[in-house]
């Protein structure tokens, strides 16, 4: 378990801060245990994959959810049968989980200026009813489909109606959906995919409003120089470190009013000088437990 003196220090930063940023990566959703399935949304877990999609190990070479990312050697029928099932579970029906609820409580003090930035496309913050006007999903969102060409920068569509049409027709044995339910771009009839950063086809402009609000928040927080700005970074690894991990290192390195709480099972290291100046701490235990402790101490 994490060092309790360091937990107290981190909780005190949270209490004393006027701005708090939550920066969340895959490790946070991996620790969000769904009570019905008894597993977290862990993209690398063989056990979670078997539990959520028992047929998929029979009908494909996949062993975990991560194997679907960039996968090409499957038919459109199997791909969409799986994706409809997966997105329906994780993006719309994972529901409230204790680790996200604990985080929400940490932000519940009305006088705190807060924001959430995440690389997860799973919509967990929305499912846990965070304020979506203070939210940036940097790598896209499974609730949006887009044209893969794309034929236009406006070719983004709510994914829900496509999923609602196809999901009842997914064969529970083969996991395939009949080809008439494979999404086609309503504008050009071409192939579609979720609006996520999977290639240069990604229609990033769908998130421009979110991104502007994020930059405004960072600007406000770093310029209140006499007031503390705490970053709680959770489960952000080295898959795409330039998106969240390195920018958080840079913020704590550059601005003296920034404090960094890094929670990471495998890589809790923080920049040396920030650690020496006691402006950054790292925790390597289970994210859910550490966040629960931080909530209890900081809201006491
Ligand atoms: Zn199109």
Image: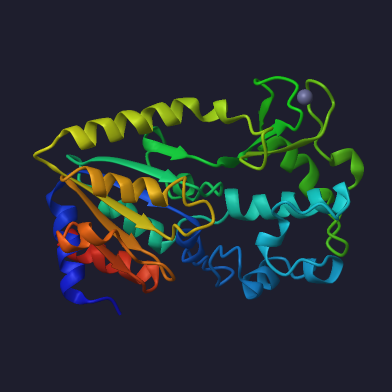
Residues 222 and 194: in front is 222
Report whether 70 appears left or right of 242. Answer: right
In the figure, 19 relative to 186: above or below? Answer: below
Q: Farthest residue in the front direction? A: 273
Q: Farthest residue in the left direction? A: 226
Q: In percent of the image, x 72 and y 54: which residue is there?
A: 85
In the figure, 145 relative to 79: above or below? Answer: above
Q: In percent of the image, x 52 and y 51: which residue is there?
A: 240
Residues 201 and 158: in front is 201
Q: In percent of the image, x 34 and y 65: which residue is there?
A: 269
Q: Which corner quadrant of the figure contains ligand 1?
A: top right
In the figure, 72 relative to 226: above or below? Answer: below
Residues 262 and 52: in front is 262
| One can see residue 177 in this view | no
Q: Farthest residue in the right direction? A: 179
Q: Quadrant of the C terminus?
A: bottom left
Q: Quadrant of the N terminus?
A: bottom left
Residue 253 x/y as whole percent: 25, 49
Residue 48 x/y as whole percent: 62, 71
In the figure, 17 relative to 262: above or below? Answer: above
Q: Quadrant of residue 277?
A: bottom left
Residue 176 x/y as whole percent: 86, 54
| One can see residue 193 in this view | yes
Q: Quadrant of residue 294?
A: bottom left
Residue 296 x/y as whole percent: 22, 65
Q: Quadrant of residue 211?
A: top left
Report whether 271 appears left or right of 6. Answer: right
Q: Farthest residue in the bottom direction? A: 1
């Amino acid at each position: 378990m994490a060092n309790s003196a360091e937990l107290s220090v981190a909780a005190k930063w949270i209490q004393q801060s006027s701005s708090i940023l939550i920066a969340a990566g895959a490790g946070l959703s991996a620790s969000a245990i769904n009570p019905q399935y008894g597993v977290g949304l862990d993209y690398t877990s063989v056990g979670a994959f078997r539990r959520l999609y028992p047929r998929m190990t029979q009908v494909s070479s996949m062993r975990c959810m991560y194997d679907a990312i960039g996968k090409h050697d499957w038919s459109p029928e199997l791909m969409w049968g799986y994706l409809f099932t997966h997105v329906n579970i994780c993006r719309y029906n994972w529901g409230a989980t204790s680790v996200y609820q604990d985080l929400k409580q940490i932000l519940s003090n009305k006088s705190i200026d807060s924001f959430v930035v995440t690389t997860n496309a799973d919509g967990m913050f929305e499912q846990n009813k965070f304020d979506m006007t203070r939210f940036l999903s940097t790598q896209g969102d499974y609730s949006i489909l887009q044209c893969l060409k794309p034929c236009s920068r406006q070719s983004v569509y709510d994914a829900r109606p496509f999923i609602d049409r196809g999901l009842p027709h997914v064969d529970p044995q083969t996991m395939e959906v009949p080809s008439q339910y494979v999404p086609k771009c309503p504008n050009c009839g071409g192939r579609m995919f979720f609006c996520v950063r999977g290639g240069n086809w990604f229609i990033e402009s769908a998130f421009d409003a979110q991104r502007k609000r994020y930059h405004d928040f960072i600007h406000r927080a770093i310029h209140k120089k006499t007031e503390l700005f705490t970053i709680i970074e959770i489960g952000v690894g080295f898959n795409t470190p330039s998106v969240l991990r390195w920018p958080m290192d840079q913020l704590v390195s550059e601005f003296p009013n920034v404090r960094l709480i890094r929670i990471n099972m495998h890589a809790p290291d923080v920049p040396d000088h920030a650690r020496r100046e006691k402006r950054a701490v790292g925790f390597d235990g289970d994210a859910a437990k550490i966040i629960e402790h931080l909530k209890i101490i900081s809201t006491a």
